């Protein structure tokens, strides 16, 4: 009893399915989920963090956990909540995330000239934040953070108690122009 040898196609097609089809399906699934499609079994769609523009023209962002707690059927109120007045005694930490010497010192001088009394400088040791940003710990500090951003010409203002636990933190990246 002798069997005829199997064809090359019959030996290689399972391997090709594993090498080509499964990665293509995985890529498609990851792309779909990362574009906000969500997982079919989770019942919730993933989405980017919410952002809004404050009256001073700066962009404020909220973390994804804050966005998830909001109801999707909420409608914005017709009147905007006014930005709180800045507190010039709030601690402001200016962090240089670049290799440009004196960048944080120049920003500190600008803030002190505008009346801020507790401004310190340092070098950013955290992960890259991409673009220059002003972090503030709570909604009550939005007015101060917005004023700092306005004085330094920064468009990105983010509420993040982790990055700004003890006051307003400014992270100067390569896109910052003094």
Image (cartoon, helix red, strand yellow):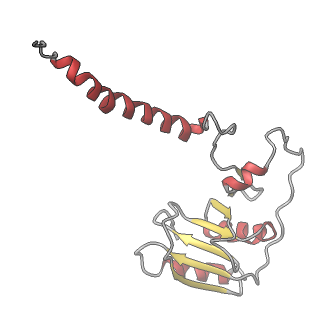
In the foreground, 82 or 20: 20
50 horizontally vs 21: left or right: right
In the foreground, 28 or 145: 28
Rendered image quadrant of residue 135 = bottom right
13 horizontally vs 40: left or right: left
127 horizontally vs 8: left or right: right
In the foreground, 46 or 6: 6
How far across and how far down the image is residue 22, in percent?
38, 32
Extreme front residue here?
A: 1
- Using the image, determine if residue 22 lies above or below residue 125: above
How far across and how far down the image is residue 48, in percent?
63, 46
Extreme left residue here?
A: 2
Residue 107 visible in image:
no
Q: Residue shown at 48%/62% (left/top)?
A: 175
Q: Quadrant of the N terminus?
A: top left
Q: Residue shown at 79%/73% (left/top)?
A: 86
How far across and how far down the image is residue 65, in percent?
70, 55
Q: Residue shown at 63%/42% (left/top)?
A: 46
Residue 112 visible in image:
yes
Rendered image quadrant of residue 90 = bottom right
- Using the image, determine if residue 106 lies above or below residue 9: below
Q: Residue shown at 33%/31% (left/top)?
A: 18
- Using the image, determine if residue 10 lies above or below residue 16: above
Tag count in the figure? 0
- Using the image, determine if residue 29 lies above or below residue 93: above
């Amino acid at each position: 009893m002798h069997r005829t040898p199997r064809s090359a196609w019959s030996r290689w097609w399972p391997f090709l399915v594993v090498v080509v089809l499964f990665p293509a399906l995985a890529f498609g699934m990851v792309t779909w989920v990362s574009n906000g499609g969500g997982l079919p079994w989770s019942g919730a769609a993933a989405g980017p963090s919410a952002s809004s523009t404050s009256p001073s023209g700066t962009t404020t962002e909220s973390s994804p956990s804050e966005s998830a707690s909001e109801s999707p059927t909420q409608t914005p109120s017709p009147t905007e909540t006014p930005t709180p007045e800045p507190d010039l005694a709030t601690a402001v930490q200016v962090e240089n995330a670049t290799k440009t010497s004196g960048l944080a010192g120049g920003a500190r001088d600008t803030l002190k000239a505008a009346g801020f009394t507790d401004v310190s400088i340092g070098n950013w040791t955290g992960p890259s934040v991409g673009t220059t940003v002003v972090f503030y710990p709570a909604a009550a500090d939005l007015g101060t953070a917005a004023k700092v951003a306005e004085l330094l010409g920064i468009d990105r203002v983010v509420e993040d108690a982790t990055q700004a636990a003890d006051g307003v933190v400014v992270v100067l990246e390569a896109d910052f122009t003094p």
